[in-house]
Amino acid sequence: MNAKTSQTAAQHSADVPECYAIQPQEIDTATASALIESRAIGEELTKTFGVPGERVGHGIDPVTETAVVRVEAGGVIIALAVPESGQPYVIQRHGQRLMELTATRRRRAQPKAVAAEFFAELKSRHLV
């Protein structure tokens, strides 16, 4: 390696704009907790109830801005909104409320019970 090569490399890196890592979206603790719970409910749907993993997702609904579990069912996306503590879970489509589950969100998450009720509703409507 000669001095000319290292000098050229230093010049080249100065010409290239510096790239920064993407900063994670800042979310509050309650939303982060709801996202974690939505992921756990989605995992229960796939592991326990056999919903194919490629049909289940989780994230923040852009319409309601709440954490949701999404299930592609019958060509449509059905979402289960994870509410604030003490509130019932809501099944929605395109941000519109379809129905509430009897399960309410508690401090200690119960993803298996919520997934079971959500799955039962999807199944009763012949969506899974």
Image: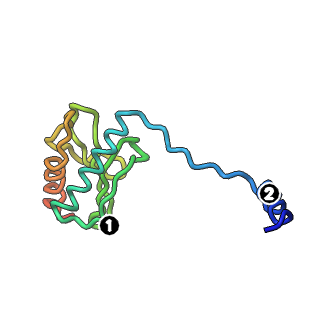
Q: Residues within 10 Å of mark 2 (few under 14, many from 20)?
A: few
* Sooner in the amino-acid sequence: mark 2 or mark 1: 2
Q: Is residue 63 left or right of residue 11?
A: left
Q: Is residue 52 above or below residue 28?
A: below
The residue that appears at 23% across and 51% down in the rendered structure is: 41
Give the camera-side residue of 25 and 123: 25
Farthest residue toward the top? 86
Q: In the rendered structure, find residue 54 and report the number of the disc placed on it.
A: 1
Q: Residues within 10 Å of mark 1 (few under 14, many from 20)?
A: few
Q: Position of residue 35 (x, y in %)?
A: 34, 44
Kind of residue at disc 1:
Glu
Q: Position of residue 2 (x, y in %)?
A: 82, 67
The residue that appears at 84% across and 62% down in the rendered structure is: 3
Q: Is residue 114 left or right of residue 92?
A: left
Q: CA distance from mark 2 to mark 1?
A: 46 Å
Q: Is residue 126 left or right of residue 39?
A: left
